[in-house]
Image (cartoon, rainbow, N blue to C red):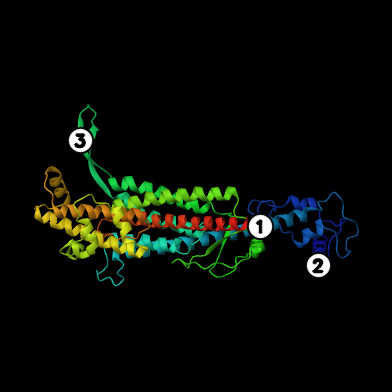
Amino acid sequence: MAKSSSIHDENHDVCYRPSVSSSVDHNDHLGRETPENSPLSGDSLAYFPSDSETSNFSEPEYGYASEPLPSRWPASKPRANLAGVSGLGVKQQQRNLLNVKLGDDQDLLSSELEMMKERFSKLLLGEDMSGGGKGVCTAVTISNSITNLYATVFGQNLKLEPLKPEKKVMWRREMNCLLSLCDYIVEFAPTAQYLADGTVVEMMTSRPRSDIYINLPALRKLDAMLIEILDSFYDSEFWYVEQGSLSGDSNRSRASSFRRIVQRKDEKWWLPVPCVLPGGLSDKSRKHLREKRDCANQVHKAAMSINNSIIAEMDIPETYMAGLPKSGRTSLRDSMYRYMCIPDKFTPEHLLNHLKISSEHEALELADRVEASMYAWRRKACLSHSKSSWSQVKDLMSESDRIDKNYMLAERAETLLFCLKQRYPELSQTSLDVCKIQYNRDVGKAILESYSRVLEGLAFNIVAWIEDVLHEDKIMRKQGI
């Protein structure tokens, strides 16, 4: 027993590695491993050999072994251990990447939550950060929010190119938040309910308000169509340069098209100028541009129609009526008033041709004056016939043979205003429209009006951008002949 103990002590001296002829039985050593200490145990992720195990399963490094390593011993086991260590490293790296991704997602959610808090606070405060109750009403706040969101997303987009992904995500996310208010704007309508015994009972049930139910899905569809039009110009045959610069683009190998850009002579001098290669666009690209122009033009007409109908349903503010002149003649020129008073057939197109309007500013000024005169004459007609609304006056005039001068002038002013807006479809909103939007208290109408207004503006811009490219293509084709 003492001899065996001495042999064991000698085998564990420093730098001593036992040979095959050593009295220690390796099979017994492996057989005595407990499940807790086993390298194959489920609790252990990797196997790290000890110094004694390394001496048993690898070749001697210092020549202390008296015999070579038998081939029946598992010499490849350290490789398996290294593979296990490498696999653990990959798992740890994946775990770290997952933690980083989760952290980024939490930061994104936190930033979006803070943004929603800001939006909600401004909505309740009416954009009055002092909290003194001097803010605007909820309808105006939402209208301003949609307008500001449009300026943030599309304000810097002055070209025919896809919208940046982050801008697109912002537009959809925040618009969905603002439009979600419409889900809670309802009206009550009678609905037939059938009981179990067959009895029919009429009950009042809620449903989306009719104007929202009709117009909001249409506006969403128009919105998606405009985004799709912009996304279709991801790989175009034209490019843009700033005013006064050269149109060469080294990145796209257009050195053959160097030329000086002609300065714009219109008011939109800040827009980048489209450029086309010599010879013009291909037939496929030209056809694509024309199709998208026609589509955007239809979207523009639809959005403008919705916007006009919503504004027409808004109440006229008392402040606007109080500021009207006592006589409609005051707002018009004497020549216009005399022409409108002619008993014969009135021709608004002839009057517009005679005025020779040269700019959009003049057209808008004329629209304001005609509209003010129209409501001044309507008010006098209502007072003279003791009617509270213009519709009642119209019904009275249709049932009688009398001819009222104020009624006739109001009708002719309305016809002239309609023809003026048809001739200048890009005309901005009149003073009355702006006043209606400012004093509107209906949240549903505010959402529909602002949504249709920004879509109308975007569609108009897309049509104008496509026209610029087609005009440049026409010039380059003429130069190539």
On residue 422, which mark appears?
none
Q: Taking 67 as reference, is 323 left or right?
A: left
Q: Taking 76 as reference, is 268 left or right?
A: left
Residue 340 x %, y %: 22, 56
**Gap between marks 1 and 2, in whole Å?**
38 Å
Q: Which quarter of the rendering shows the N terminus? A: bottom right
Q: What is the secondary structure assignment of the residue under circle 1?
A: helix
Task: Determine the residue positioned at 23% across, 49% down.
Answer: 345
Work out whether residue 261 can be spotted.
Answer: yes
* Sequence order check, earlier mark of 2 and 3: 2
Residue 288 x %, y %: 54, 48
Given residues 5 and 472, the one toward you in this image is 472
Q: What is the secondary structure assignment of the residue under circle 2?
A: loop
On residue 90, which mark appears?
1
On residue 202, which mark appears?
3
Q: Above or below — where is 373 with respect to 415?
A: below
* Sequence order check, earlier mark of 3 and 1: 1
**Gap between marks 2 and 3, in whole Å?**
101 Å
In the rendered image, which residue does mark 2 sit on? 13
Given residues 151 and 420, the one toward you in this image is 420
Report the amino acid beneath label 3.
Answer: Glu
Q: Taking 106 as reference, is 252 left or right?
A: right
Q: Which quarter of the rendering shows the C terminus? A: bottom right
Residue 381 x %, y %: 13, 54
Front position among marks 1 and 2: 1
Rate crowding at label 2 as few (under 14), some (14 to 19) or many (20 or more) other CA atoms within 10 Å.
few
Q: Above or below — where is 43 with respect to 359?
A: above
Given residues 203 and 56, the one toward you in this image is 203
Rate crowding at label 3 as few (under 14), some (14 to 19) or many (20 or more) other CA atoms within 10 Å.
few
Report the amino acid beneath label 2.
Answer: Asp
The part of the image, by quadrant, that contains residue 438 is: bottom left
Front position among marks 2 and 3: 3
